Amino acid sequence: MPDALDFTEKQLILLVDDTPENLHLLNALLKDQYRTRIAASGERALKAAAQDPKPDLILLDIMMPGMDGFEVCRRLKADPSTAAIPVIFLTAKAQVEDEEMGFKAGCVDYITKPISPPIVLARVRTHLTLKAASDFMRDKSDYLESEVAKRTREVQTVQDVTIMAMASLAETRDNETGNHIRRTQLYVKALAKQLQAHPKYGQHLDDRTIEMLHKSAPLHDIGKVGIPDSILLKAGKHTPQEFEVMKTHTILGRNAILEAEKLIDAPSTFLRFAREIAHYHQEKWDGSGYPEGLAGEAIPLSARLMALADVYDALISKRVYKPSYSHDEAVAMIRQGSGTHFDPEMVGAFLEIEPEFKEIAERYVDVHETAA
């Protein structure tokens, strides 16, 4: 980052006055130490100030025909590209009310006419130094903000990749590809977006929340890493005892994420959603699900979203123990499960966007399957 206080070329001063003699005097006084640009009217001053390179300081006469100095200053300060340029008024008007009007317009100082060369040089030097310091701090702040944003993006990328790697580790134990993760992630996001307009759910589903749900969804079956292969990969129907073991993947997932939460100093919305989804995505609206038999709105919203997304994808996907159903068949089954397996209002939102679910399924179809 360049040092704004280390001047490698002369600073530029815009001189504005409708009297040629005054411009000549100021230019002669300043040209040896600074670069100068000249404007003989308010309108020309605005154009000269907008040109690159921008002036570092403006010496501005107040009493000019047409647009006076007060109006010029107000317009300069209203334009983001010139607002930071300090303006010093040059004027014979030295009344308190005149100075008050000038400061309200945005000037930083007054120099009264007839000018005193030492005073002009001293005021110019002071305000150029102040501007340079201000520019330096602004540039430093922008640089640091940029660096923080860059580091944050890097950390977020590492986090996202780690999440997907962990989720894939669990999924690939009983699923031949990782596309299930991507599909369910996108289903959850699409369904949550649709529910933003719902009077009951909209207040809970702002854009940031939806992004957190989208990122945490891949961890829904992370607990499967703790299920023995003999049960997890069994092609046939599970015995009651085996099914009880299989059901514990929700607890195992919850516990793993809970341990991760203990390692951070402050609560994490992302980990909370991941924990809710892992723990409760097998619950059913009528209370017949597991692991706790929760019913209705006692099931967290995040888990209700995941439940519908997960079931839809399971229905359209081929498994060793079942064929794949078509999209229309899956939609019919989810409609049938409204009020028993699924939140009825969530099913209603799903039915409004079910073509979007189909498009996601086709875009990320498993390589060994034909899209439903």
Image (tube, grey):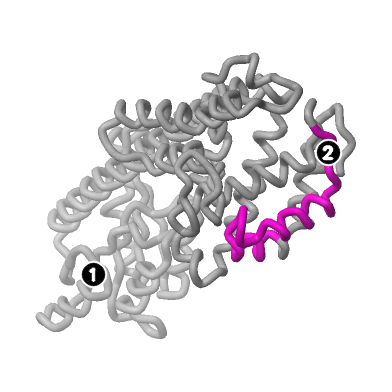
Between the C-alphas of marks 1 and 2, the distance is: 83 Å
In the structure shown, which secondary structural element does the residue marked by tag 1 occupy? strand
Please give the name of the residue rendered at 49% of the width and 69% of the height, measured from the top-left corner.
200
Q: Nearer the viewer, residue 108 or 173?
A: 173
Relative to 308, is 106 above or below? below
Relative to 292, is 84 above or below? below
Please tell me whether mark 1 or mark 2 is closer to you in this view: 2
Relative to 213, is 68 above or below? below
Instruction: State the image coordinates of residue 86 (x, y, percent, origin top left).
Output: 28, 59
Badge 1 amino acid: Leu
Q: Nearer the viewer, residue 174 or 337?
A: 337
**Residue sitting at the far front:** 240
Instruction: State the image coordinates of residue 123 (x, y, percent, origin top left).
Output: 17, 55
Q: Is residue 102 left or right of residue 202?
A: left
Q: Quadrant of the N terminus?
A: top left
Give the mark count: 2
Q: Are marks 1 and 2 in contact (CB under 8 Å)?
A: no
Residue 249 is tagged as: none
Badge 2 amino acid: Ser
Boundaries of the magenta span: 322-350
Residue 90 is tagged as: 1
